[in-house]
Structure formats: structure tokens, C-alpha cells
Image (cartoon, helix red, strand yellow):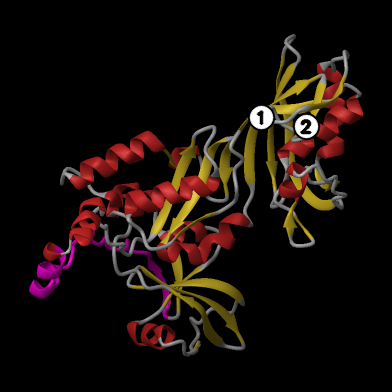
Amino acid sequence: MTVMTTNGVIDAQDADARDAERDALPEPRTDEVRRVNNDPRQKQGKQNQQPRRDKRDVHGWVVLDKPIGMTSTHAVAVLKRLFQAKRAGHAGTLDPLASGGLPIALGEATKTVPFVMDGRKRYRFTVCWGEERDTDDTEGRPVRTSESRPSADAIRELLPRFTGLIEQVPPQYSAIKVQGERAYDLARDGETVELQPRPVEIHELTLVEHGDNGQSVFEAECGKGTYVRALARDMGRILGCFGHICALRRTIVGPFTEADMIPLEQLEALCNRAASGEGSLADALLPVETALDDIPALAVTRADAARLHRGQAVLLRGRDAPNSSGTVYVTVAGRLLALAEIGNGELIPKRVFNLSGLTASPARNHESN
């Protein structure tokens, strides 16, 4: 990969991986030990206490191959515990029914989450015809049924109506907020919520398989805010046979593909090996800048890097100064420094990164370039 620089064009260098910090529990003072030993209640409390693991700085992305049945929030909590990370968050909710790519940002990678959420997503999903459910998937109760089943030709003829920029009504059981309440909470309380249609973009929708078992397999590539469950619901209504999602897998999220995914069992095994000194958790991390794949990179000198790190703008001078404008990610000596805006001949820092702690191994950095 090549990057822009205020002094020309240079080859990007890989960021160095940091060693994981060792956990250490502070030793109690002698007088504290004496008081604990002389108080039976404190003795009992001490026996019930579990050793507290210190949190540490971990920076990077883990693309979990989320198993069916796990919520996205639970997945984040599990990874945060495995890495003992101080901060974590995910880039786009994946329903418990669904499997596949759930990008989880650790540490400074959380600053790049919006860039992943704004990216395209690709799904492979199965629709069961003949029944519409209140959740638009198998977890709900039937609300409409039909004995008719669509033909493959009828489905293919319909697909162009669901391709491009379309209006879509979110499912009743969705995270959309209605007067401060989540729609799924209101639906569980028995309330019927009138959700307004929203514009979403479907870049591609194809019929992959159509069998005699009343099911059809599709692949869809769509933009932010699209509900695949709503696609199944709306197609079923137009076809007159009704339908709901009975299988769903996310295969692409922004720059992350199935090749980047790691199953939870494999991740837990890696963590166990790392704890015994036979491996490193850095091998499971992708670099923070992986999320910035579609953003130009700009290399600066160490002197300019120092100014940017202090939150100060840098003047872009000389014939080799970039003449573009907009968002760039800034590097110094091949290491991610900041997200910045170019405008009026200046480089203005917006988000500065502090990557001290555990980061992706050099091998993962090579993979991302």
C-alpha cells in the first residue's frame, strides 16, 4: 500500500505490536492484614472474594463469527472479558437468530466504529414461505398464513422492486426508538407501534436457491439501516404467500469478510494458550486502521506529528502537499496517529489515537495491507 505524504509518496510501514501487560494484584499493608485476620466477618468476606483481574489497554478489531443464540451485547461482554480490555463496542447489531460477522472494536478502535457501520453489509438468508410472524423471523408467533407458494420465476420478477433506493418499514421488534422507548420493548408489552418508512439502499438482491420445501435462499448486499427481516416480510406480502426469515448469516461488514472471522471457540482456545505463554492475543487482533480502508492515508513528519498529537493544526506547504480536502487518517513512521480533516491548506486533527498497550501482531498488519 502507498500513502500520501507532505513530502511526496512513501511506502507504508507496519505498526509494531506491543507486549501484553502482566496482571498484578497490589499487596495489602500489614495493618490491613491484621485487621482482616481479627474480624470473623472480614474473614468470611475474604473467602468469598474472587481475585480481581486488572483491565488493560487493548487496541484493535476482532471479527467474531457470532454463533446463533448469542446477543451482540453478550458477545461484546465475552470478548471484553477474554482480553481484559478497558473498552469495547460492536459495529452493528446482529440478531440472536443470526450468525456471522460481528466486528468488535477494542480500545482506540472504538473511535473508528462509525466508518464500519456506514459500510456495506452482505447477508445470506433463507425465507420460509407460507407464514408471516410478528417478529419477521422464527422466534415470533404466526400472524398470517397462506397455502400458496411462490415460483422461482415469480420471485426473480419481484427482486428489481427491492433493489436500489427503497422505502422500508422496520420490524415491530426492532431497536428503533419511539418516544424514547425501544420498539421491541413496546411490542413485547403488547403495544402496536406505527413505525414510519425509512429510505434504505439495496445494492444487490439475488435468488440463490429455490426448492420444493417452501424455502428460498437469497443473498443481499445493502447499506446502513436495512432490515433483512423486513425484506422477507414485504416480499411475502407482495407474492401473496407471506414469509419470514428462518436462517440468516452476515458475511461482509464494511472492510471485514468471512476470511477475517474467528469462531468463539477458537478465540477462547487462543486466550487459554496465551495465558500459559504459548501464544499471544495480538494474533487475534486486526489493526485499528483496518476500519479506515476507504479513507486516504497521509504520512507526516515527527515534528508535525507532535503538533497533531497536541491537537494543533499543521500547515500543508510545498509542491508535494496534497491538494485534496476531506477526511484522512494520519500516520507517522507507518503508525496510526490521528483522524484529521484537510481544508484551507491545513491539516486539522479530529481524533487522536494513543496505541500504547496490546495491538495487532506484525503478521496481522501485513494481512491488512
Badge 2 crowding class, 10 Å Cα cut-off, few under 14, some 14 to 19, many 20 or more, is: many
Q: Name the residue beneath numbered marker 2.
A: 232
Looking at the magenta stretch, what is its main secondary structure?
A: loop
Give the residue drawn at x 71%, y 48%. Answer: 185
Q: Name the residue beneath numbered marker 1.
A: 125
Seen in the image, is 72 located left or right of residue 353?
A: right
Seen in the image, is 273 located left or right of residue 191?
A: left
In the image, residue 255 lies at what x, y percent? 53, 50
Q: Check whether the beta carbons of the residues at disc 2 and disc 1 lie within 8 A of each other.
A: yes
212 to 92, vertically: above or below: above
Give the residue drawn at x 38%, y 82%. Answer: 305
In the image, residue 101 lies at what x, y percent? 52, 41
Task: Tell me which corner region of the image, top left, top right, bottom left or bottom right, holds residue 273.
Answer: top left
Q: Amino acid at mark 1?
A: Phe
- Tell me the magenta residue range: 7-36
Q: Secondary structure at mark 1?
A: strand
Q: Alpha-carbon distance for marks 2 and 1?
A: 9 Å
Mark positioned earlier in the residue sequence (2 or 1): 1
Task: Tell me which corner region of the image, top left, top right, bottom left or bottom right, holds residue 243.
Answer: top right
The reply to whether residue 256 is visible in this rendering is no
Please name whichever residue, 267 or 250, is drawn nearer the observer in this view of the structure.
267
Give the residue drawn at x 46%, y 87%. Answer: 311
In the image, residue 71 lies at what x, y percent? 55, 42
